[in-house]
Amino acid sequence: MEQIRTQVGIVGGGPAGLMLGHLLSLRGIHSFILEDRSQEHVIERVRAGVLEQSTVDLLHEVGLGDRLGREGLRHEGIYVAFGGERHRIPLAELTGGRAITIYGQNEVVRDLIDARAATAEPLRFEVDEVSIRDFDVQQPKIHFRHEGRHHELTCDFIAGCDGSHGICQPTIPAAQVKIYERVYPFAWLGILVDAAPSSDELVYSLHDRGFALFSMRSPHVTRLYLQVSPEEDIDQWSDERIWSELDLRLHTSDGWRPHRGPITQKGITRMRSVVVEPMDHGRLFLAGDAAHIVPPTGAKGLNLAMADVWRLAGALDKFYQSGSETELRSYSERGLRRTWRAQRFSAWMTSTLHRENSSGASGSSSAFEQRRQRAELEYLISSRAAMTSLAENYVGVPFD
Ligand code: FAD
Ligand code: DHB
């Protein structure tokens, strides 16, 4: 077995792992990133698109703002649609100028991989047989296989950035963690379309047939989502069926609807909330989806991952500068505060905008729930206080 040494071993080359590696390299701390998928797969995986203000600020601060500045779409508001009407929530006006930026997660990942390639710091794709050990003692180790050869990577710390199906979190003894979980009776069918967005801003819509979301990736690409049942089979959704359902759910009385075009990607994502407490165990620190999953309605997952690694990089820097572990020891507590805040907001957005038991064919929520949702949305658009509450959570509070 080949022996390697680094300061921070990072499992997972998604946004969390790559950003952590970047922040550490700026501080002169060595890391080794291991990713089990191919570089093409990681770059092409279509996922999040909404960056909070603090995520955008961080990307600029760490030298990753060039393409984001040119191609990212800054949005100062969103629409909430119900009862056939669209209502604008002026995010920037309500939050002292904070906004969101539309820039695909895969573009963030592409920029981070390019930045990594410009350093001498290692990033290995297509590794397998990854396992971690000795993370409750001084010299944790990661075993992995790359290009047929076995390696042992000895580190000072391990960062578990391997997402919701990774190996780091399940390696912590079950008695040492508490996992909170809620599974929602919904999923999102998402499509990417070669068509110019028909609205300058996102539209979150509640219709009797269920939730629909209008979003975008660029001036030429529209992104759309439909609430479907978690058991739904994507093969049952022809392009025509998707378009007619989107038309029904998004069409508003002013004649607005999304532009149609060729569908270039489609997929179904189930929804759940997960929180792992604590986020650390000895010298292993979990970050991003490895530590928490939020339903996508609040657009928080990628942004929480960025907040985690910003905090972790700061704490590791303190340790290497002064030997102090104080910040490392408060990493989990500070992260959980932000995580639960995001869970609250995401669960609220989800329950306000989705129809229970809707499979796209009929809205059979209880009559009470439907009236409650209607009252919630009417209050939202009529109260500056309610809109401000949504706005400050949606654009995100500063990293802490
Ligand atoms: P991941 O992106 O999952 O990265 C983990 C990496 O680890 C992966 O590359 C994986 O291949 C790798 N890995 C796994 N196991 C191993 C192993 N054993 N060894 C080595 N590598 C391993 N969030 C938002 O903020 N805004 C949005 O608008 C938004 N929309 C979304 C829409 C959809 C449809 C989906 C699915 C998610 C959305 N999210 C959104 C959530 C966001 O995509 C995730 O929160 C984000 O990807 C988390 O990043 P991560 O690096 O923690 O995890
Ligand atoms: C997108 C995804 C989300 O989860 C969301 O809440 C808004 C937009 C998107 O992919 O564009």
Image (cartoon, grey):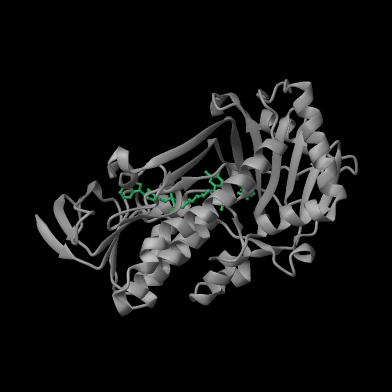
Note whether residue 339 is visible. Answer: yes
Measuring from the top left, give residue 198's x and y in whole percent.
77, 51
The quarter of the picture where residue 359 lies is top right
| Vertical position of residue 247 compared to residue 222: above or below | above
Q: How many marks?
A: 0
Measuring from the top left, give residue 182's x and y in whole percent.
52, 34
Relative to the observer, which residue lies in front, 114 or 284? 284
Note whether residue 219 is visible. Answer: no
Relative to the observer, which residue lies in front, 220 or 117? 117
Measuring from the top left, give residue 49's x and y in whole percent.
59, 54
Residue at x-position 31% and y-position 44%: 167
Furthest-left residue in this view: 1
Relative to the observer, which residue lies in front, 392 or 236? 392
Report whether 237 appears left or right of 119: right
| Vertical position of residue 37 compared to residue 97: above or below | above
Residue at x-position 86% and y-position 37%: 84
Relative to the observer, which residue lies in front, 261 or 55? 55
Report whether 348 appears left or right of 283: right
Report whether 261 appears left or right of 381: left
The quarter of the picture where residue 253 lies is top right
Measuring from the top left, give residue 123's x and y in whole percent.
30, 62
Report whether 348 appears left or right of 16: right
Quadrant of the image containing the N terminus: bottom left
